[in-house]
Image (cartoon, helix red, strand yellow):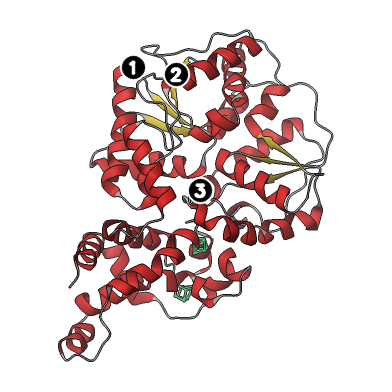
Amino acid sequence: MSDKLTLGMEAMRAQMDTRVMSYMSSCVHCGICAEACLFYTETGDARYTPIYKVEPLRKLWRQEYTFWGKLAASMGLSKKLTEEDLANWEELVYDGCTMCSRCSMVCPVGIDIAYMIRKVKEGLAAAGFSPEGLVEAGKRAVEIGSPMGVTLKTLDATIRVQEKETGLKIPMDVEGADYLCLFSSGEIAGFPEFIGSLAKIFRATGVSWTISSEYFEATNTGVQLGNSKMAATLVERVVSAAEKLKVKNVISPECGHAYTTIRWDAPNFIGRPLPFRVVHIIELLDELRRDGRLKTEGVNTDRLSYHDPCNAARRGGVIKQPRDLLAMVAPNFTELPETGDMNWCCGGGGGVSSNERADPLRLKVFDAKKRQLDAIRPEGLVTACSNCRHMLEDGLEENEMHDIELLGITELIADHLVEESG
Ligand code: SF4
Ligand code: SF4
């Protein structure tokens, strides 16, 4: 057996929990999950059927964890998992899945396929079958603290610009603040006005907050890559920064998978509960709205719609909050068809947009989003995930849909803020 195969199989064995085993034994091979997956619907390629993407894990489960599988393997009657299988599945799993969980919503026996995709990634990553772009992003995340190589110096410079634009001091390393805010590198580099918008909203609503100079990255490349050890290291950095500043709450910014990781998966990665509450920025803004602290004035009369980031909406349930916030400032809001927990993925999540090899495929599967947009053709599309925003920008550009403006929900609210202390 090759070294690569041994490493891959060991990593997948370590992931073989009761959920995986019960999912594997429950699948009735109905194929319903295929029609929920944008990689299948937009390419027509049956290899992108969600359950087929976890075939290496299924093979291992069958040959080592089932009576008939073990018997068949011992008699040489079944095909064993091979290194070639792992090599062949790299593209299907890393390029052809955003871990959006839409397939998990439609499976009649409740199989969470996205959960198993992550387990397969652990095996492929351990065996060395991961895309170079994502591997390099992982190295930068560990060595520099950001998958895009954003340093504290870059953040400092961004903060200075935002302080100048807003006339507000942006707090850094404030011990005992109520909230520690994380950012994704994509936000700092691509949408720095998000930071200025937060400063305006938190001043107006009287929220005590801070950024940590020790660690400010929300993105967890370990999850995208399928490297639990790396994921745990990155979670520990958040915990350490929060503990040093003695904060009670950590804000996950406009980034879908970052929220899922720190909100739901982090305790499992580090083996203990988190010593703080985690809240998505949109949940916090909605709490402030409900408490009467967040007030807006004026409206955007354009026909705006909303793209639900998969992880925040489908895996996190953050669906009503953005709509309640939009109701304050967007009187002509119009829903996309198939929205909320059945929204179609932008095509760039789960590390796909960090993997340059997948660029043609992610732009191809954007056709699902294009169909949704063409059905109502909004004047503006609002979202709450910087990664979605980057992908939507690329998709709209590729399809010459220049009439649709992209907006971040936090900036939209900040633009209409009543600037008085709550
Ligand atoms: S998680 Fe999303 S992209 Fe991945 S297989 Fe399921 S529907 Fe397709
Ligand atoms: S929908 Fe569920 S039961 Fe049907 S093939 Fe897909 S994973 Fe199996």
> Which residue matches tag 2?
153
The spot of residue 40 in percent (x, y) is 57, 70
Q: Is residue 239 above or below residue 381?
A: above
Q: Is mark 3 within 8 Å of ligand 1?
A: no
x then y, percent, for residue 44:
61, 75
Judging from the image, what secondary structure is the residue with disc 3 in?
Answer: helix
Which comes before the other along the chain, label 2 or label 1? 2
How many residues crowd mark 3 within 10 Å: few (<14), some (14–19), many (20+)?
many
Q: CA distance from mark 2 to mark 1?
A: 20 Å
| Residue shown at 72% from the left, 47% from the top | 397
Marks 3 & 1, CB-CB < 8 Å contact: no
Q: The disc labelled 1 sits on which kind of residue? A: Leu
Q: Position of residue 283 (x, y in %)?
A: 54, 34
Specify the quadrant that holds the N terminus: bottom left
Q: CA distance from mark 3 to mark 2?
A: 30 Å
Q: Write the residue at 20% across / 76% down.
A: 64
Question: Can residue 16 be seen?
Answer: no
**Residue 245 disc label:** 1
**Tag 3 residue:** 311
Q: Amino acid at mark 2?
A: Lys
Residue 270: % across, % down: 25, 40
The disc placed on residue 375 is none
